[in-house]
Image (cartoon, rainbow, N blue to C red):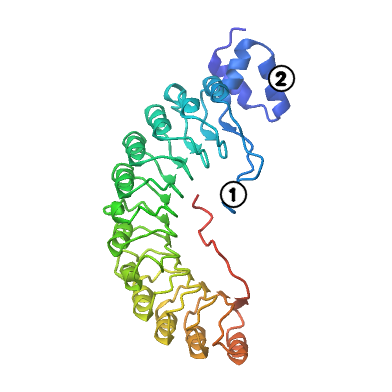
Amino acid sequence: MHLPDDCLFFIFEKFDSSVDRESFGLTCHRLLHIQNSSRKSLEFGCSFSQLNHSLSKTTIDIDSFILDKLINRFRRLELLSLCGCVNLLDSGLSQLQNHGSKLKSLYLDCCFKVTDTSLSSVAIGCPNLSFISLYRCSVTDNGLELLAKSCLFLKDVNLEWCSLITDSGIFSITNNCRELRAIKISHCENIKGVGFEGCSQSLACMEADFCKLEPEGIVGILSGGGLEYLNVSSLSWCIRGDGLRAIGGGFGKNLRTLNLRLCRTVGDETIMEISKGCPLLQEWNLSLCTGIGLAGWESIGIYCHNLEKIHVNGCRGLCDRGLLALRNGCERLSVIYITRCQRVSSLAVTLFKIARWDVELKLEEVMCIMPKHFF
C-alpha cells in the first residue's frame, strides 16, 4: 500500500459505522496505527455522579501501567475522562508529557490519589488544554501554578471540593489564563475570593456555594465585570449580609442569573442595591433568604424589568404586599417558584393568578439554576 498517511486518515474519517472503523484497523499494522491515531476521545465507564456527590459501590480500578500504554497508543486524544478512577496514581498520567499535545478536555473527578505531580505532567504535555475538572482531587496551589503557567488557553476549570486550594492558586489561574470563561470553587473553604482580583472580563460563570468568602473577595470575583452567572448560595454562616451589596455596585451589571439561596442574613438594603445595579438580571434565586422584607420585594418589582424567573421558597418575609409588588412590576416575569411562604395568603395568590395569568406559580424548589451552556 503506497498511499500516504494523510490519504488514509481521510479515508478512515469517511467511515460512518464503528464496525467499518474496527475492520479497517484489523487489516494491517499500518492501518491499525491510522485507526489509533484517529481516536479523539477515551472515556472509562463510571458510576460516579456529581448530581448526588457520591460514588456507588462499583468503582473503577485503572491500572496505571495499562493507562500509560493506552495514552501511548492513542496519541491524538482531544478528550480524556477518568472520572471515578479512585486508585489512579500520578504515574498513570505521565505519558501525557509526551502525547498530550492535542488534549483539550481532561476529567479527573474523584481521582483521589491524583496530586500536583499529575498537574505537572499535564502542564508539560498539554499546552492546548481548555477544560479540566479536578473535583475532589488532592491538588494544591503549587500544582495550579504549574498548570496555569503552561495551559494559557484554559477556559473552564472545576475545583469543587479541592480543600487544599487557596486564593494563591486562584490568582495563578486568573492571572495567567486570560481566556478563563467558567470556574467552580464550591466547598473550597480556604478560598476567600481575593485571588480573583483583576480577573479577565471573559470570566462569565462562577460557582462558589458553601465558600467562606469575604466582602473583599466578593469585590474580587466581580472585578472582571463580565460575570453573567454567579452562585454564592449558602453564605449565611460565613459572611455578613451587607458584604453582598457589592454585586449591585457596578461590576455586576452584566449578571443574568444570580443564586443567593440560603443567604439568610441578606436584607433589604442588599436587595435594593442589587435590584438597581443589575438591570439585565433574568433569574434570581432568593429561596430561604429570610431577612428580606417588604422594601426588598418592592425594589425588585420596581427595578427588575428583565426578570423572568424568581425563587422565593421559604422566604418568611414575603407577604401579600410583597407578592403584590412583584405582580405590579417585573413585566417580563414568567415563573415564580413559591412554597412555604406562610405570610402569603391564598387570596393574594388567587388575585396574582387573575392579574398575571401569563406567570406560572410552581410549587417546587429548584437547586441548580446554572445555564446549560456553562460546563
Q: Position of residue 200 (x, y in %)?
A: 31, 51
Badge 1: few (under 14), some or many (20 or more) residues near its Cα, within 10 Å? few
Which residue lies at the image location 42% right of the left edge and 50% below the top edge? 183
Q: Relative to 20, is 234 above or below?
A: below
Q: Which amino acid does the dot numbered 2 rest on?
A: Ser
Badge 2: few (under 14), some or many (20 or more) residues near its Cα, within 10 Å? few
Q: Which amino acid does the dot numbered 1 rest on?
A: Ser
Res 54 label: 1
Q: Position of residue 64 (x, y in %)?
A: 54, 25
Which residue lies at the image location 62% right of the left edge and 11% below the top edge? 29
Q: Position of residue 19 (x, y in %)?
A: 73, 26
Q: Which residue is mark 2?
A: 23
Q: CA distance from mark 2 to mark 1?
A: 39 Å
Q: Position of residue 78 (x, y in %)?
A: 51, 32
Give whichever of 47, 183 is nearer the camera.
Answer: 47
Residue 58 figure quarter: top right
Residue 209 figure quarter: bottom left
Q: Is residue 149 left or right of residue 323?
A: left
Q: Is residue 218 left or right of residue 45?
A: left
Q: Relative to 82, is 358 above or below?
A: below
Q: Secondary structure at mark 1?
A: loop
